[in-house]
Amino acid sequence: MDERSQRQEELLLIEQKRQELEEERQQIAQIRYSIDQQRYDIEVRQNKLIELEPFVPLTRQLETMTSFAQPTVRFILFAFYFSKI
């Protein structure tokens, strides 16, 4: 193999490696975006839970006071929660 064809082969290999690295870079960027989106979703959920946390004791008290109406109380609280989303 002469020097010129060897050089072309090396350049081809370098270009292939560059393309592979670019694909990996794009995959990493997509993974980072996904992680950032999941982190944001978790923060939103945490904020909603923090907002509703003061109502937990009241909910438990209502459930024990009105054991016959538990399904109704749960429905009301469920509706209240989802009306804030």
Image: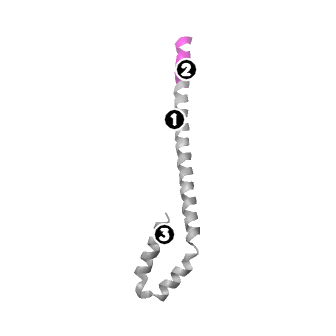
When the figure is inspected, residue 54 is found, relative to residue 1, above or below; the finding is below
User: Which residue is rendered at x = 56% and y = 16% of the image?
Assistant: 7
The part of the chain drawn in magenta is 1-13
Question: Which residue is identified by label 2?
Answer: 11
Q: What element carries label 3?
A: helix
Q: Distance between the residues labelled 3 and 1?
A: 43 Å
Q: Mark 3 points at which residue?
A: 81
Q: Which of marks 3 and 2 is nearer the N terminus?
A: 2
Considering depth in this image, is 55 or 25 the residue closer to the camera? 55
Q: Could you say whether the residue bearing mark 1 is in a helix, strand or loop?
A: helix
Instruction: Say the numbered circle drawn on residue 23.
Output: 1
At which x and y percent is residue 58? 54, 81
> Is residue 28 highlighted in magenta?
no
Q: Is residue 24 above or below residue 61?
A: above
Judge the density around disc 3: few (<14), some (14-19), many (≥20) Cα neighbours within 10 Å.
few
The residue under the point 58% across, 64% down is: 47
Label 2: which secondary element: helix
Give me the C-alpha separation between circle 2 and circle 1: 18 Å
Q: Residue at x 54, y 46 (%)?
A: 33
Residue at the spot x=47%, y=75% of the render?
A: 77
From the image, give the main secondary structure of the stretch colored magenta.
Answer: helix
Lower position in the chain sequence, tag 3 or tag 1: 1
Name the one closer to the observer, 16 or 53: 53
Q: What residue type is labelled 3?
A: Tyr
Image position, residue 4 (x, y; %): 55, 11
- Is 67 placed above or below 32 here? below
